[in-house]
Image: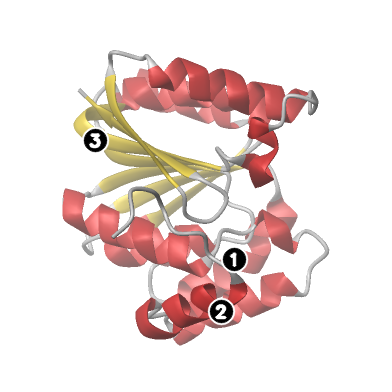
Amino acid sequence: MSNRSIELDDRIHAYMMGVSLREDPIARRLRDTTAAMPEHNMQIAPEQGQFMAMLVKLLGARHCIEVGVFTGYSTLLVAAALPKDGRIVACDISADYTSIAQPFWEEADVAGRIDLRLGPALDTLADLLAAEGPDGFDFAFIDADKSHYDDYYESCLSLVKPGGVIAIDNTLWHGTVADPTVKDRDTEAIRALNRKLHTDPRIDLSLVPIGDGLTLCRKR
């Protein structure tokens, strides 16, 4: 019995992965391709991707948003969890990173569910709100530049329907959010959002210690 989350050392993490992770071979090859890149730490952990895919299925989600695509690993997993007529609007500014993703999306037969939109995500989210109105999406995942996290959150909160979920990545930020001596812009932005979410009456809240911290916000 324990009244707090277990600390995952390498041994326990390896055991957990061995008895839990069910990774599609195409997703694994995309993850391996990304692992060879200098920016590989921008990709989510596979256990987090599997967790989000299950969440999408539990929600019965059909319409999703992703803010920050990188090489498309999380996009692939979420798209694969959607029904065939579902869609995920995937927002990113990099044609280079997302070009790595697209052959894997095609091979996994999920490209038709992915609406990739290149450009500033806040503009894309504003366009979605203007074109489709509020409360039209079931799930949103935010994993982009940290200085705009609060702006992305507010935009997604307008777009997600009541009962829908916004998942926000990196909310433990390698543990630096708990170190008051760390005061860089990204850390301060995440701290500020974490404080805001803690008392936001518009949502139900859980910060899950998976990956680098994943905050789940259920719109009331």
Q: Which mark is residue 31?
A: none
**Measured from the top left, where is residue 47 in percent x and y?**
45, 67
**Amino acid type, mark 2:** Arg
**Measured from the top left, where is residue 34 in percent x and y?**
69, 70
**Measured from the top left, where is residue 217 in percent x and y?**
34, 32
Residue depicted at 37% across the width and 83% down the height: 19
Q: Which mark is residue 164?
A: 3
Q: Nearer the viewer, mark 2 or mark 1?
A: 2
Image quarter of residue 68: top right
Residue that numbered label 1 is attached to:
101
Binning the other alpha carbons within 10 Å of mark 3 as few (below 14), some (14 to 19) or many (20 upward) gives many
**What's the CA distance linking mark 1 and mark 3?**
26 Å
Image marks 1 and 3: residues in contact by CB distance under 8 Å: no
Image height check: is 217 above or below 74? above
Image height check: is 79 above or below 122? below
Residue depicted at 70% across the width and 37% down the height: 176
Let me know if residue 117 appears in the view.
yes
**What's the CA distance linking mark 3 and mark 2?**
35 Å
Element type where label 3 sits in the image: strand
